[in-house]
Image (tube, grey):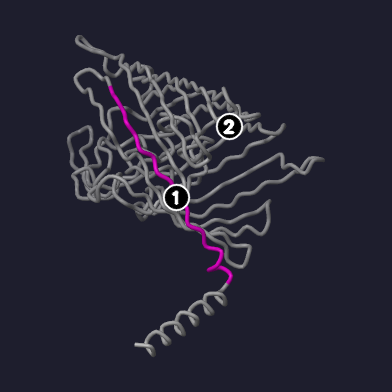
Amino acid sequence: MRKTIILSVMMLCSLLSKAQEAPKWINNVKLSGFGIVQYQYNGMHNNKSNTFNLRLGRVSLDGRILNDWYWKAQLQFNGNTSTLGASPRVVDLFIEWQKYDFFRVKAGQFKNPFTFDNPIHPIDQGFMSVAQSVQKLASFSDRAGAHPSNGRDIGVQIQGDFLKNNAGRNLVHYQVGVFDGQGINVRDVDQQKNIIGGVWVMPVEGMRLGCFGWTGSYARKGTWTDAAGTTHSGVRSLQQRRYAFSAEYKVKDWTVRSEYVHSTGNAFAKALSNTDASAATDCNLSTDGDKAQGVYALVIAPIIPKKLHAKARYDMYQPSDGADKQRTQYDLGLDYEFTKSLALSGIYSYVHDRSLNGPAGHPNYSMFDLELSFRF
């Protein structure tokens, strides 16, 4: 027994010694994550609901290799394992060469460089979700019919900051990337690539004025019927052309942000949520046509700086050409930060959805969202 204890102690000392001699990139690995627990009431006529929900849960590892290389791997855990949109899945897996501020190269799966709203952390974003135009036109629940992808895709991107002023602050940022165009964890289907990019200027500290562009396609392999009633099969590729204009000003715990997003390009009739579902091979087109647009404007104001905030957002989205199906959402809320790692947020929303109009239509309803979020 004594010999066993001595051997165990010697083995532990040996392991500790080896750990101290481990490569620097291993010692730089950091574990982090966050969770958002949600209660939501939806007062839509004939579809009312109130439910507790695990909105998001993520765990990530990140680190550096040889100082110039930064890497990150992030998993999302919520929902079940049967669907692409809600199952545990990889959301980020990339490496970026960061030797120069003015020229960085990123490869893997990460955020599309499109809109200001898209890359903001879900807790810091401030509302129950990103704006409708960003949700539908930046690869969250994309209008084209792709599976929910949290604003991400697989590809390669370059980005950088340059043109410093006398205070040493960069005045210009650019980012542009080449992506598969199919969303996260899915390979390219039509062998065409999406080119997405943006540039913004920062004339004064805290202000960003930007514009973004997107050209590419979203494709499926399956069957569809044309206007003449003829059935076709194979790969059907839907071209997508999008642009956005963005403005933001953050100063003294105030945030003011607004973006306009426009899209040209058809969509599939059924959104993809499960690779085994019929939607995976359904290549028929949506009746919404090839135009969509949206705009939002928000303000987050401190009541107690760094502790208690009031917030409001106007959020309008048109899924088709014209205002017949326009959905407008007005958000009002408060959030309270117990610490930097724990916050409580409540949002009341009044919704006017013209797609619900009709002889017995009820286009107006209310929603309430309460979220407790934590980070580690």
Image point 57% across, 62% down: which residue?
Answer: 64
Who comes first in sequence, dot 1 or dot 2? 1
Residue found at x 24% / y 47% = 274
- Write down the residue under mark 1: 33
| Circle on res. 306 | 2
In this view, the residue in front, 276 or 88, is 88
Is residue 232 positioned above or below 205 on the image?
A: below
- In the orientation shown, which residue stands out farthest toward the front? 2
Q: As displayed, is residue 159 above or below residue 332?
A: below
| Numbered tag placed on residue 209 in the rendering | none
Q: Is residue 102 left or right of residue 18?
A: right
Amino acid on which the number 2 mark rests in the picture: Lys
Q: Is residue 25 magenta?
A: yes
Instruction: Please give left or right for residue 225 compared with residue 1 in the image.
Output: left
Element carrying mark 2: loop
Residue 207 location in percent, x, y? 66, 31
Mark 2: few, some, or many residues within 10 Å (few <14, many ≥20)? some
Amino acid beneath label 1: Gly
- Residue at (47% x, 28% y) in the render: 335
First to last magenta residue range: 24-42
Residue 10 among magenta residues: no
Give the main secondary structure, helix, strand or loop, of the magenta stretch: strand
Name the residue furthest bottom.
Answer: 3
Viewer-closest of 315 and 199: 315
